[in-house]
Image (cartoon, grey):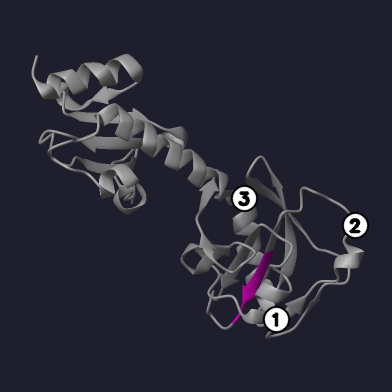
Amino acid sequence: MNIIEDEYYKIIELYPNAIFEKNCITQVKIPLKDKFFLEIDFKNYPKRPIVNLISKNGRIYRKVDKSIPLLNRWGKKHPPFIVDLINEILTFINNLESKSIKIKRKLLNGLFSLCKNQHPREILGLLRIVNGIAIEYILPPGAITSNTSGSLIPSRLGLDLTLKGSVHSHPSGNPTPSLIDINNVFRTKQFNFIIAYPYNQSSIKCFNNKGREIEFRIQD
């Protein structure tokens, strides 16, 4: 048994759901959530393998090379096992998912329509988030908006632990948060969406409470 065959048998033992492309033992896909796959090509092992996250239709969703320590310090003389690499990548993905957010497509389309109807005034509201999914827009009492800004009155919101997100529009067309956004609207919320003009999927971004951009996915 050569070194590549040895890696292959380790993979099928620990990951029985692994899929091997065209009966090639060096091209493996591990099914993930939401119709995504972890794809690893280790035909040149012990050289560094090629790793991608891909969608069901083959589109590369995210390259993970720079985020995985085993890949960054890969050495041909003492390479890690492929199964150890898979385990580290899956751990990274699980941690990433805990910091990401999904939003219902129906809700998002409704927000686009609301932004267009209110333009050039901003919209401002909260998002109800259940199990990591934004499912409902809430217009809080006392919210104030204008053509350039919006503000909330925290004391009028009450205690609702599901209101973990915020959303507001930027009629200017720039989806970057201002210092006012970060110090006011973002401050107490985990996920903060900005929808910029022209209010479509290419003009929306999500940020954490520090103003750092985070990933989001649209769920049907």
N-terminal-most mark, 3 or 1 = 3
Q: Which residue is mark 3?
A: 106
Amino acid type of disc 1?
A: Arg
Q: Which residue is mark 2?
A: 158
Residue 16 shows up from this direction = no
**Residue marked by disc 1:** 121
Is residue 30 visible in the rendered structure shown here? yes
Please name the residue shown 60% across and 56% down the image: 108
- Check if residue 170 falls in the magenta segment: yes
Answer with the quarter of the image where residue 139 lies: bottom right
Cα gap from disc 2 to disc 3, whole angstroms: 26 Å
Per the model, the C-alpha gap separating discs 3 and 1 is 22 Å
Which amino acid type corresponds to the residue marked 3 in the rendered image?
Answer: Lys
What residue is shown at x 71% (from left), y 67% (from top)? 187
Magenta region, residue range? 167-171
Report whether 194 appears left or right of 125: left
